[in-house]
Structure formats: C-alpha cells, structure tokens
Image (cartoon, grey):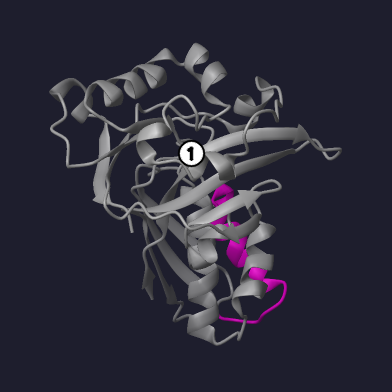
Amino acid sequence: MVVFPRAKINIGLRIMEKRPDGYHNIETFFYPVDLTDALEFVVRKDNRKSDTLRVTGVMEGSDPDDNLVMKTVKLMRQSFDFPGLRIHLHKSIPVGAGLGGGSSDAAGILKALNRYFGFGLNSEELRSFAGRLGSDAPFFIDGTPSFAEGVGNILSEFPLDLSKYHIVILYPDVNINTAEAYAGCVPCPTGLSLRQLLNLPVSEWRGRVMNDFELNIFRAYPQVGMLKVALYEAGALYASMSGSGSAVYGIFREEPDLPREISRYRLNTCEMI
C-alpha cells in the first residue's frame, strides 16, 4: 500500500503561555501544501512479526528506530494484531524545517494501517492515536486547513481561502530543533488575536501576522531571515518562517520569477488547496 503524506505551513504562530508540564500553549493556523513524502508498506511473506523500515531521500541513512513511522507501528501493535511489515519511506519533506513531515508520516501510516487491516477506527480515534506521537500529528489525519490551539492539538475550522494565491517554499538546509526554538522565546499574548488578524486581506498580513519564533531563529541563523527578505523583494504579499523553522514561504498573487540566488533553495511552488 502506498500513501503520500503532505506537508503543512504555519500561517502565524503566537506563543501564548508556558504550561506546568513544560510545553507551551500556542495559536497558529495549519495549511496543507503540495509537498509530499512517499510511504509504502507490504506484508512480510515469512510470517515474522518484526518490522523493517528503509528510508531514502533527504533522510537517507538515518536510524529507523528514531523514525516516527516505526514508533507509530509499535504503538499500533499495542492495540491491534497484524503481520510484520516491510516499509519504505522516501523523504522529500526536510526534517527540522517546520513543515510537519515526521508528524505527517505518522498520520499517514496510521490511516494506511487502519484502512488496509480494517481496524475500524474513526477520525476522532485516529487523532487520539496521533496525539501520542506528536502535537501537530492530529492535524494530518484529516489534513484540512485548521486553526490550532493548545500545543497545536486543539483544532477548529476557520474560513480562510487562499486558493487564488501561489506559494513558494524555500529551505536553507538548516535543521532547527524544536526545543532549541522554544528555549529562546518569551510568551507575549498581547494585541489582536491571530483569528482577528487572519480575517484581514493577505496583503495586510505583513508586519501583523507574526511567527514568534522568528526573532531568535533569525539571530541564530541569519540565512533563514535573509530568505524571508528575499521573498518580499521578489514580490510576495506575505512571507514567514513556518513553525519553528527553518523553511520560509512566500504567498504571491501570481507565479513568481525568482532570482537564481534564491531559487536554488526552492522546495516547491503550488496553488493552495
């Protein structure tokens, strides 16, 4: 069985408060984009219950035991009995880019196992499993544009239509650890809420719809901030780092003609769904 887990971008990200458990409550908006990994599994023919994972692409050579796909399979085996699997994950979504690739892979294998083996889990039950694997993993069960609160796991519908725009995602080949990103941030829940700001036209988001991670990340990794500036210089209506970085995206009215010096960082260009 083959599935294609999709990436997401964060439009705005406000760090509201630090929680007693050490995590942070946030406000953000998740939006899916047409950048995908490829995930395939087949049932082992030797009747063994052990699972294997081969990773190719941007994570080739990584440790399979550290991969969320394998952690997801192990989690499902605690509740369901199914044959051993041979799994192949081809990564196109970079790690540490703020695009949710690992969480999307986890949700992808969850849904694929549920469908293939007929576990009968509904979306709410799948989101419950996903929430044990990553704070943003529940979003990828349905993958519809969603306003996210809590640690990113409390999802609600929000009427934001970007189908007339084009998006460019740039990746500067910098891997940013989420814990590192949070370590430099101070919660500051003041001003208009993100919900209010997202009701403004996209052309008015610049300087208003903010990602609270950017200030410290741009100081530590100036090349990330330079790409955001370059997107605005190329005509983006709005540009931002996604999540805790390091990918940066720009929203354009039309397909842009990017200068060669930044087009080499480009992951994809797509119309938003």
Percent of width and height locating residue 123: 59, 75
What residue appears at the point 41 percent right and 43 percent down from the top-left corner?
61
Q: Which residue is mark 1?
A: 98
From the image, give the main secondary structure of the stretch colored magenta: helix
Most distant residue in the right direction: 20
Q: Quadrant of residue 254?
A: top left
Above or below 219: residue 92: below
Task: Report the span colored magenta.
Answer: 65-83
Which quadrant would the C terminus be assigned to in this image? bottom left
Does 212 sit left or right of 238 as displayed?
A: right
Nearest the eye: 121 or 152: 152
Q: Nearer the viewer, residue 70 or 24?
A: 24
User: Residue 262 location in percent, x, y?
Assistant: 22, 24
Front residue of 95/218: it is: 218
Looking at the image, residue 262 sits to the left or right of residue 272; the answer is left
The answer to which quarter of the image holds residue 174 is top left
User: Is 66 included in the stretch rendered in magenta?
Assistant: yes
Q: Which quarter of the image is occupied by the N terminus? A: bottom left
Q: Hey, what amino acid is under mark 1? A: Gly
Residue at 57% across, 69% down: 50
Please name the residue shown 60% across and 26% down the image.
181
Residue 135 in view: no
Q: Is residue 273 visible?
A: yes
- Side of 54 relative to 198 (left or right): left
Q: Is residue 266 magenta?
A: no
| Image quadrant in which you'd find residue 251 | top left
